[in-house]
Amino acid sequence: MTPAAWADRARVAWRDALRDLARSPLVGFSAALALAVSLSVLALHVFVIANTNDALDAIARDLSATVYLAEDATREGVDAMIKETAASALVRDVTFRTEEEEKARIVELLSADLLSGVDAEAIPTQPVVHVRFRPEQLDEASFAQMGALTERLAATPGVASVGFEAGHVRVLFAIGDLVRLAGTILGIGALVVGLFFVALLIRVGLDRRTEEIAMLRAVGATEAHIYAPMYVTGALVGVTGGVMAVLISGLIDGRLAALAQTAPNVSLSFDLVGPGLILWCVVGGLALALAGTWFSVRRHKS
């Protein structure tokens, strides 16, 4: 086939695709919008999961437990506990602080306004053992092991109590599980809806062209020539849906930027829109639309 013939075929396919879209503008817009929503939901789903993991990693860098020793604690017992705790793969280091060292640390942490008029002897302190966990990726299994370790320490003779303030970690795990479940359900649901509308649009176009397709087959037109306009239609809807997904993500990104300004000390990335997201929206929208087109064309052929 000559280049001129290829150009003429492309021109005809483009013309027929635009004609089909003009005949079904509502279905075409619904298909593009459904694709845009599905792509945006999936992108936001990945974004939230990534930030949840980053938050857990940041927490893991400062996660620790404080073992408060009782009055009957012996030096031999404390040394044995420190040695056993330090041998755990979860623990980064173990530090023993005397009563005086712990009091000096508390005084350093408190502001001068809070200590104004307070006698240093009135600050209650006791010897402690400070346990810092390894700053590695935090998951539910390692967090459960940390909790089990603090429970064993609390049951050790000579230990009055153990401070392991990590309720916020459990909340983050629960939020992460909820986001994964809800995002997966919503993403798959929006994806199915998007594919359905694309397939419906292509099916409507094929039904309108029944007589035309029969005539083309009668004069010997190839399958590629007959169905090329359908794939051009799908591609146009896919690219349009991808652009709309970028615009929707841009609106969400603006709200995230406003949220970041209210929490400047939070070391998390609130940037949603970037080259990766734009590529995902355009290529993903095109791929999904072509998949829906292929499904309708295949059913029409059979």
Image (cartoon, grey):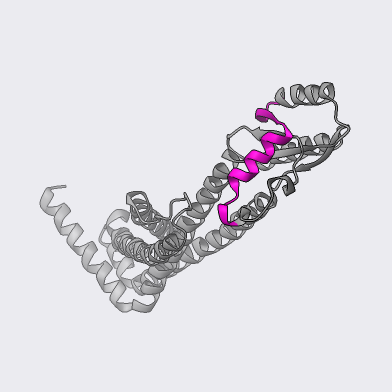
* Any part of residue 297 in sight: yes
Q: Residue at x 85, y 30 (%)?
A: 73
* Any part of residue 24 in sight: no
Above-or-below relation of 21 to 80: below
- Name the side, left or right, on which 298 lies relative to 126: left
Q: Nearer the viewer, residue 32 or 150?
A: 150
Q: Nearer the viewer, residue 236 or 174?
A: 174
Is residue 74 covered in magenta?
no
Q: Quadrant of residue 99?
A: top right
Q: Position of residue 48 (x, y in %)?
A: 51, 55
Q: Position of residue 88 (x, y in %)?
A: 71, 26
What is the tally of numbered marks visible in this picture?
0
- Name the side, left or right, on which 43 lies relative to 21: right
Q: Nearer the viewer, residue 97 or 298?
A: 97
Q: Residue at x 70, y 35 (%)?
A: 100
- Name the side, left or right, on which 250 lies relative to 188: left
Q: Position of residue 134 (x, y in %)?
A: 61, 32
Q: Nearer the viewer, residue 36 or 207?
A: 36
Q: Residue at x 74, y 49 (%)?
A: 122
- Name the side, left or right, on which 5 lies relative to 238: left
Is residue 101 covered in magenta?
yes
Above-or-below relation of 232 to 76: below
Q: Quadrant of residue 272?
A: bottom left
Above-or-below relation of 26 to 115: below
Q: Quadrant of residue 222?
A: bottom left
Q: Position of residue 283 (x, y in %)?
A: 35, 52
Please state the extent of the stretch shown in magenta in the rendering. 88-113
